[in-house]
Image: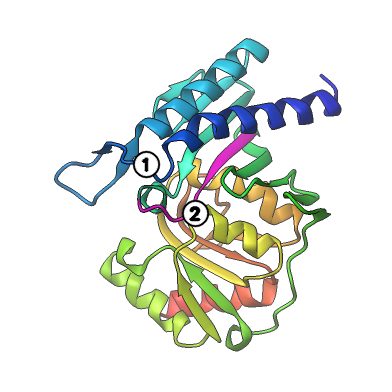
Amino acid sequence: MTAIDFSAFIDRLATVSGEAILPFFRTSLTVDDKNAGGAFDPVTAADRAAELAMRAMIRDTFPSHGIVGEEFGADRPEAEYVWVLDPIDGTKSFISGMPAWGTLIALTRRGTPVFGMMHQPYYGERFSGDGKVARYRGPRSERAMLVRPCESLERAVLFTTSPRLMNAADRAAFGKVEEQVRLSRYGGDCYSYCMLAAGHIDLIIETELKPHDVAALIPIIAGAGGIMTTWEGAPPERGGRIVAAGDKRVHAAALMALRAG
C-alpha cells in the first residue's frame, strides 16, 4: 500500500469516527461508569459507536492487522501491525460539554508506534506524526509542528489533566515540579500533548495512563522534536507515569525533580 493510500485511509478513519461522535456531543446522553465503586471512569454511546466504526474499516481494509481499543479490547494483538484506538480521549470533558477531547488513532509495528493522529472533530483539527515529522491541519491552515525551546523549569508552562488522578506520593512529587514552573494549568487530556507539539506548552506530567492513551501521541511528539518517557526515563509505549517535554533540558530537569520528590 502506498503512502498516499495510507494517508487517505487515516483521513477516512478519522472522518468516520468524528461522524459517529459529534451527534452525541453536548446532548443529554447516558453515561455509564466502567469502574463502579472506584474512581469515576465514564463511557458513552459515542465512545462505543466511534470505536466500532473504526474497527469495521480497519478489518475491511487490513484484515491481517490487529486492533486494540479502549472499549472493545484486543483482536490479534500479536500481529506485526496493530491499530491502537481511543475513540474519545477526554471523556470527562466530553460529557461536560467541554471541547478538550479527541480521537486517538495509532498504528504500531512490532509494538512500536509508527504513526499517530489526534482528531478533534468539533474544531475540525487533525494533529499527526510519524516520529520524524508532525503536522497540523485545521479549518484555516495546514503546517508543520515544532516544539519550542525552553531552557529551564522556571520558564516552562506545565500541564496535567488533574493532580487528583495521582496517588499521594506522585502528587507530592508533581507538586515539587509545579512549584518551580512559570505557569501550571490543569485539563486538556490528549489536546495538551498536541499543544506541546505545536509549541504552546513546554511540559506535561501524568500518571496512570494506559497504552491507548499514549500510542498515538508518541510519534506526534517525536515528530515535532519533543521527548516523551516514563518518570524513570524508559520508553512510554506501555503508559504509566509519563513526562512529555518540548525541550530535553526541561525534560531532564523534570525527571530530576520528580525523583527528588
- Whether residue 214 appears in magenta in the rendering, the answer is no
- Whether residue 100 appears in magenta in the rendering, the answer is yes
Instruction: Give the image quarter of residue 141.
Output: bottom right
* Dot 2 or dot 1, earlier in sequence: 1
* Residue type at the position of mark 1: Thr
- Disc number placed over residue 155 in the picture, else none: none
> Which one is in front, 169 or 126?
126
Give the left or right position of residue 223, taking residue 182 as reference: right
Quarter of the figure that contains the N terminus: top right
Give the left or right position of residue 147, taking residue 56 as reference: right
- Disc number placed over residue 27 in the picture, else none: 1
> Which one is in front, 228 or 21?
21
> Which one is in front, 49 or 124?
124
Dot 2 falls on a residue whose secondary structure is: loop
| Residue 148 percent coordinates (x, y) | 74, 72
Dot 1 falls on a residue whose secondary structure is: loop
Read off the residue under disc 2. 99
* Residues drawn in magenta: 96-107
| Residue 113 percent coordinates (x, y) | 64, 39
Instruction: Give the image quarter of residue 199.
Output: bottom right
Work out whether 106 lies above or below 37: above
Work out whether 192 lies above or below 109: below
**Disc 2 and disc 1: Cα gap in Å?**
13 Å
Pair 2/1: label in front = 1
Total marks shown come to 2
- Inspect this view and state whether residue 130 appears: yes
